[in-house]
Image (cartoon, rainbow, N blue to C red):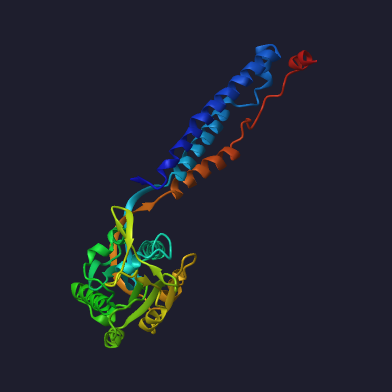
Amino acid sequence: MDWLHYEYIWVLLAVPAAILLFLWAGWKRRRAAELFGDSQLVARLSKAISARRRRWKAAFIVLGVLFICVALMGPRFGTKLREVKREGIDLIVALDVSLSMMAEDVRPNRLERSKNEIKKMLNDLQGDRVGLVIFAGDAFVQCPLTTDYSAVRLFLDVANPEMIPTPGTDFGAALTMARQAFKGASEAEETTDEDRTRALLFVSDGENHVSNINQLINEAQDEGIVIFTAGVGETDGVPIPIYRNGRRIDFKKDRNGRIVSTKLEEQSLKDLGSEGEYFRIANTSSSLPKIFDALGRLEKTEFAAEEFEEYEEQYQWPLALGLLFLFGERLLADRRKSTTPVDEETSLQIK
């Protein structure tokens, strides 16, 4: 047996409260009778009232309150099999962790802002499997496809430029790794590529250092992968800070000692996501939440159908008993069906 709302156990205090209320009412009646006068006269005048019926009415009310309180707590007992079908899409987020993502044209910087926006997206996803690929000059799968969004958040938190020593930004490497992650999930479940609806979201500042990835994009599209892109940053050039032990010590410089600037390259991201949609993550706004409309237009596929046992809710039975006792109390009169008329002597005493 289990309780759906065990935190409502305090409502059971209404039962002893009702009992105390009836005891107090009985004491008040006896006190009033004593103040009225002769006890024998009061007894003869109140012969029409049945003390036993009053006790039964009080018991009915107390039992009614008890069962309604139990119903509020939501008793659950007995088990039943329930089948739950999980439907959704496979979504891989390819996060750029190159050094340019440390630029601070959006607060606190491009990388941290990207992480925050992805976390917000995870909060609103339901049923979809999500994976994480991080990339710079190279790429690897940080988190395979999973419905455990907490795990994705943990892997997301630790993503930083130091995890990929190869400098630069290679969209092709990220795309290749994402395709391998999709295929790996299909092989593990012994399904074909056509059994899954797949989406790939690039989150980057768009500074791609590999010129020709059109063939890779076409191959991904042939595999049914819909590519979305999100550009983070501003279109004005800003320097790339270099931190050590949490303190900024310099800005990135080229071989000639000049400070390197970076800016958002929107066109490369729009070209990459030409079959999907492009979203913008700016300093004071973000259009990434619109991705849910785009994902909603994709066909959802069934991941699995699971059966599990759960308790059956049985609140209706104590609720019905409680209402029955309260209704019975209203039907039960506290007066006797036939009463003995007050005799003449009693009438004279009253006068």
**Picture quadrant of residue 336:** top right
Q: Position of residue 344 (x, y in %)?
A: 76, 17
Label total for image:
0
At horizontal 28% and vertical 83% (from top left) the residue drawn is: 220
Q: Position of residue 192 (x, y in %)?
A: 23, 80
Residue at the right extreme of this rendering = 351
Answer with the quarter of the image where residue 350 lies.
top right
Residue 65's place in the image compared with 126, above or below, is above
Q: Is residue 23 toward the left or the right of residue 159 in the image?
A: right
Is residue 231 visible in the rendered image? The answer is yes
- Indicate left or right for 39 with 177 as reference: right
For the N terminus, the quadrant is: top left
Residue 267 rendering spot, x and y as whole percentages: 41, 81
Residue 35 falls in which quadrant of the image?
top right
- Asked whether residue 297 appears in the rendered view, the answer is no
Q: Residue at x 46, y 65 (%)?
A: 283
Residue at x 33% of width, y 51% of height? 78
Residue 112 versus residue 278 in the image, above or below: above
Q: Quadrant of the C terminus?
A: top right
Residue closer to the observer: 287 or 16? 287
Q: Position of residue 346 (x, y in %)?
A: 74, 16
